[in-house]
Amino acid sequence: MAIAAGGGGGGRFLARLIDSSEPSSSSSAKSSASGPSVASRLSFHFPTHRHQSSCSLSMNGCEGDPTAPIGTAETRTFPAVATPGLAVDRLSSAVAGLKASPLGLRSGIIRLQVPIHEKIEAIDWLHSQRQLLPRCFFSGRNSAGGSCSDCLLEPSSAASGNGNGHGHLRRRTGHRLVSVAGVGSAVFFRRVSPFSYEDWLSIKRFLSTSCPLIRAYGAIRFDARSNVSTEWEAFGSFYFIVPQVEFDELEESSMLAATIAWDNALSWTWEKAISSLEATINQVSSLVMKLRKQVPKAFILSNNHVPSKNCWGLAVKRALQMINGDDSALIKVVLARSSRFLTATDIDPIAWLACLQIEGENAYQFCLQPPNAPAFIGNTPEQLFHRTRLSISSEALAGTRARGESGASDLQIELDLLSSPKDHLEFTIVRESIRRKLEAVCSGVVVEPRKAIRKLSRVQHLHAVLAGTLRSEGDEFDILSSLHPSPAVCGFPTEEARLLIAETEVFDRGMYAGPVGWFGGGESEFAVGIRSALVGKGLGALIYAGTGIVEGSNPSSEWDELEIKISQMRAPAKCMSLVTHVTSSAQIASFSFTFPVGLPDSAKKVPFDVRSSLDLRTTTHFLVHSPSWSRK
């Protein structure tokens, strides 16, 4: 795994963030012609692996006329079947029927869907698809905290049976859409320039209230004005897809769907779209294996934090100087850290995500992976907004404490969080900022509760829910661009905090802390992409976490908070007990293990050859982790 070489230069805070305690690496300076210089950024190269299967490329919807209506938007539902295999057969026949009877329209989008009696988890289906790319996954929170969709939208009798309906749907309570997994792209949306109103219109052009399950899933960069590092290049400034083949997990059943989209103006004709969809369906596996929600034990060869703990302390102190200074309007800034874990074997992002589903109940789980790119996965508790027609809700989340080991200690920690002046200040900044932004485009904004505790499996936060009514559905773009970035992930005032982040951080946040979710015809939902990681072959994982710096912050305490926040991302691996530094071949030769008492002889095998796993010309240290071995 090579660090990208780059030019010199660097910002005025570079010395504060890179010190001799960090591994040496080349860096690439980032700067803006219209603003102050920024810190040099680390960039990681991802090797392209031929065994990853990519679906054929489709059209980029951002290149069309966003104001031109498409010819048709339809949902066609077929009779329910017993298994995913039968659903694939039904879809293949339906696509063949479309191929034989072209519609004669210059543009359109059609969703073909087949209900499946059996309930199958969407994460299991996605893991069975042999890494078909692009792929996406989104799972809403449980009903207590919001959902991917309140209930399944079921076709009326006119739209069922032979599949010739036009997607007129009615609500069927008790059949909530739990999770969605998709491969391929019927249409994708990507630019390197910042997400704009025209880009939003380009996405909405392919969506319709009459086809509520045609959705565009994706994410937007935290800061589109910053340059993109190599590891994030495939994502652009934003990346959304309407999946070609989609698996919907419902509360009591499942559904397999295929979507075809075409637009002659984009040189993506009906014939090309049909051929592309046929090719993707032919690669879809009908056999869905139950995924064990346990990541195989991984040997971590190295890990390092950017910034290091020493540099973190300097950065926090610098931020506090600005916050406490008379010549700065800054009240809060959120500084983040990137932690890279390089493993002896590649990490399976879908298996890791499956573990996070257990680790993080009442949270959003997501995965987004363009072709020839790493996977962006996460388990975030924070909602950016949820819109259903004109109704919109958001939430404020700030202040972090670990959960207690007992009920009594957990309650004491909760009371400490509720009474902390520092956390109250941080939380109030977030809540009031969101309230003001909602009031700009909403009527009757309600904040209830104004301050409560949100408990997750490993952490607890201060929490408030805000709701209002949009004056127009067209205000959705204004809400998205206004709410992001919130003080919870950037700071306050926003622009002052953003500039300090750009000057201070030496890694590219990419989609970390940006909006991640989906647009639909009459409904949209976005979470904040925190508690997240970028996972790629040959890279290991880049795990991201941030913490709010306000008056009264302590560098050491904030570092501890970072450790708490990434604990849920590290927990599923269960492989953090042995740390060994080796700097010479002689040390490698004497490296040995002590096995637990009672372990059978057949199990007493070191799982990989340490010597063959290292290039001693370039490796200065490595770490080996295992819950069952220790060094003699």
Image (cartoon, grey):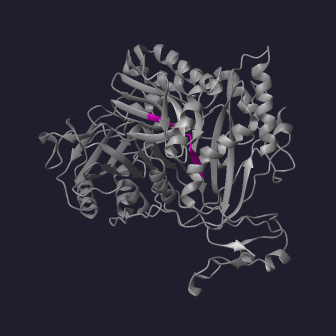
Please identify the dominant SS of the magenta region: strand
- Magenta residues span 526-534
- Check the image and report above or below for 354 versus 606: above
The residue drawn where x is 53% and y is 38% is 460
The answer to whether residue 233 of the structure is visible from this angle is no
Q: Quadrant of the C terminus?
A: bottom right
Q: Position of residue 318 (x, y in %)?
A: 80, 29
- Check the image and report above or below for 599 versus 616: below
556 or 135: nearer the viewer: 556
Whether residue 407 appears in magenta in the rendering, the answer is no
33 or 84: nearer the viewer: 84
The answer to whether residue 304 of the structure is visible from this angle is yes
For residue 91, side relative to residue 146 (left or right): left
Q: Position of residue 186 (x, y in %)?
A: 39, 47
Residue 335 placement: quadrant? top right
- Check the image and report above or below for 472 versus 544: above
